[in-house]
Amino acid sequence: MFLEVFFNGISLGTLYCLITVGFAFTYNVARFFDISQGAAFLFGGYIGYQAVNVWHMGLFPGFLLALLGSGVFGAVVDLALITPLRKREATPLVLFIATLGLLMLTQSVLAFHFGSDTKVYESGASLTVTLGNISVSQNQIRMAVSALALIMLTLLSVRLTAFGRRIRAIADSQTLSAVVGIPVKKVIFMVFIFASALSGAGGFFFGLDKTIDPNSGMSAVLVAMIASIIGGVGNILGAIAGALVLGIMGSIVQFYLPGEWKYTTIFIIFIIFVAVRKQGILGIEYRST
């Protein structure tokens, strides 16, 4: 039974990984906590619901539409909100509050259009696969594999492509990147599209595996922010490790304790890391001299 709970935690952690990686990407290039990733998460979840349940397009076309819609949402956010504020030299706190307001606006609009009740995808019957003492649904396996594939492609693109090298350069120094001819604004724009598409994929998978409602985005981005911090702020691999830790712990807590303890446990983990290892799992500790 514990192995089944552990696998469910890994499956949940991989879904958290998608929005956490998107959150970490925008932080690396823009240097603020981008709460609009929670809105992109919601967009992906609700676009998938509309495509699968209302338009009856099927899961794969619905997934592609969720990716596309969330990516477009990220482009609009950068062009209409982030870029104008950055031109006015807005502080990270101002950008944080602005994107928080955008998430709250998105929640209200989606609640008005779809209702505030939870939505369940009509994914059809999902067979249960038994692997030794572990029983999991085919949908869980598909989602975990798909999420892992997206994460691996993301990591490879960051390491092996020219676009990835530009992201790493901007993360180190925007000023020096501009000096050597890197189009900083264009790269940041593309990162917001890419990150929002990843978050939207997380929303689609979350809606397929569980349910989606207007409050799901706030919960997801809160987990992503804590996962990024306990993994090591600015470290993509650390963010992935943090998301997996929270997914596993959340699954274990939900099995052994009432569901209300899930987010309490996440905050307890956060407090422990801040007190004991403030640089996070894979972060670098800076010492004053």
Image: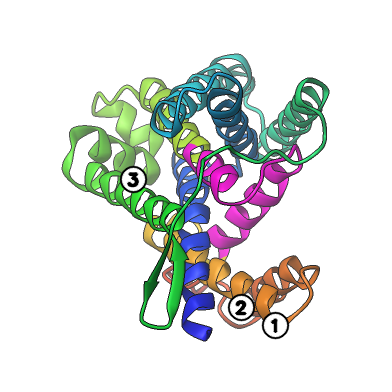
- Residue 251 spot, x, y in % from top left: 60, 71
Of badges 2 and 3, the one in the foreground is 2
Q: Are marks 2 and 1 in contact (CB under 8 Å)?
A: yes
What residue type is disc 1 on?
Answer: Tyr
- Secondary element under disc 1, as helix, strand or loop, is helix
Residue 97 placement, left or right of 58:
right
Q: How many marks?
A: 3
First in sequence: mark 2 or mark 3?
Answer: 3
Q: Quadrant of residue 264?
A: bottom right
- Residue 252 spot, x, y in % from top left: 61, 78
For label 3, the residue is: 150
**106 is higher (above) or lower (below) than 129:** above
First in sequence: mark 1 or mark 3?
Answer: 3
Q: CA distance from mark 2 to mark 3?
A: 25 Å
Q: CA distance from mark 2 to mark 1?
A: 6 Å
- The magenta region covers 201-229
Would residue 279 be visible to someone looking at this image? Answer: no
Q: Quadrant of residue 240?
A: bottom left
- Secondary element under disc 3, as helix, strand or loop, is helix
Is 78 within the magenta? no
What residue type is disc 3 on?
Answer: Leu
For label 2, the residue is: 252
For label 1, the residue is: 256
